[in-house]
Image (tube, rainbow, N blue to C red):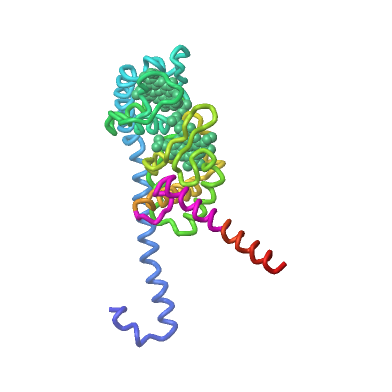
Amino acid sequence: MRFLARGGRSSKDRTSLRRHRAARPVLLLLSLFLVGATYAAVSPATESVADGAADAQLIAQGKALFSQNCASCHGLGGEGLAQQGAPALTNVGAAAVDFQVSTGRMPMANPLVQAPAKENTFTEDEIAALAAYVASLGQGPAIPTEDQYNPAGMSPEDVSRGGELFRTNCSACHNFKGAGGALPNGAVAPSLQNATPKQILEALRTGPGQMPIFAEGALPDENAKQVIAYIEQVNAVPAAGLSLGGLGPVAEGFWAWVAGIGSLVLFAVWIASRGARA
Ligand code: HEC
Ligand code: HEC
């Protein structure tokens, strides 16, 4: 065997051996490529037919669910009904449906200023079907995939960048810790405590209610993920008991009082000492 005798070879032998050894990976790559090419040539036809059938079935199921639960306000074709104040859904995309239904906002019980979040009564499959039907009506953002929103493995630098982005873009409405707050026009920016990473990204891309849309161009997926990592971290803190904010406004007021009165006392002492000198 050539390989066993390797140690005793001249340098010339070694180069030819290297050439031989290189031949193996090349052959392997070549055959992999051939397999790939053959597969690509054969499979799309069969795959897209199967996909198409599954899609059509999902859309049909979604259409049925939609006419029972949504059409009274949004119209049978999702065109929106002005008398219900319900917007057209023709270009909102699957992400908007997944967000609105998974947070329990839709179906709305009755048209209000703002659809409140509540218990979602649909299964994941039903939501997928509804989303597929609405997506089939036009264009709009798709439901994001896990690699777009899962913040696992983000570094501390990522989290602090997320914090900066959050303070610049979100805290005006949602408070710097995501605790939520009232908006001037009677709407409410909810607490982000219960939002899942997927729902956060969907909210960014679809801009529910009074919230502006943060499109991919303004806030790329990578930055959105940093914001998500920050929100997740902030949400985790109160449970660990490290945050003053977790104690509520009374405790915060108490510390403001201690610090405020404390500095006044120090100031008074300082004035007194100057007075004594004069
Ligand atoms: C009682 C009336 C009503 C029903 C029923 C209803 N909606 Fe809505 N929907 C509204 C109103 C009003 C809004 C706008 C208010 C808001 O976004 O808070 C809205 C907004 C939406 C949006 C957000 C659109 C956007 O521009 O982002 C989606 C998506 C949606 N509805 C999907 C559904 C689906 C799916 C169902 C059925 C499961 C449903 N709705 C049932 C009234 C309704
Ligand atoms: C102009 C105010 C405003 C800004 C800025 C804003 N939001 Fe919102 N956000 C809202 C309002 C209002 C709602 C509720 C909409 C509704 O219920 O229809 C909301 C809803 C959400 C929700 C859904 C929460 C849940 O549990 O249902 C998430 C998540 C969210 N916002 C994240 C963000 C993030 C992240 C940013 C910054 C990149 C941001 N928002 C910026 C006003 C705002």
List the single residue furthest toward the top.
Answer: 83
Q: Look at 64% across and 63% down and name the residue there.
A: 272
Horizontal and vertical percent position of residue 8: 35, 87
List the single residue furthest toward the bottom.
Answer: 8
Q: Which residues are magenta?
A: 240-263
61 and 111: which one is in front? 111
In which quadrant of the rendered view does residue 218 lie?
top right
In which quadrant of the rendered view does residue 192 lie?
top left
Relative side of 57 to 266, left or right? left
* 26 vs 126: above or below: below
In which quadrant of the rendered view does residue 122 lie?
top left
* 245 vs 143: above or below: below
Q: Quadrant of the N terminus?
A: bottom left
List the single residue furthest toward the right.
Answer: 278
Q: Is residue 213 visible?
A: no
Horizontal and vertical percent position of residue 150: 39, 48
- Regarding ligand 1, which quadrant of the image does it lie in? top left
Q: Is residue 265 visible?
A: yes
Horizontal and vertical percent position of residue 134: 40, 25
107 and 223: which one is in front? 107
Asked if the stretch drawn in magenta spans residue 261, the answer is yes
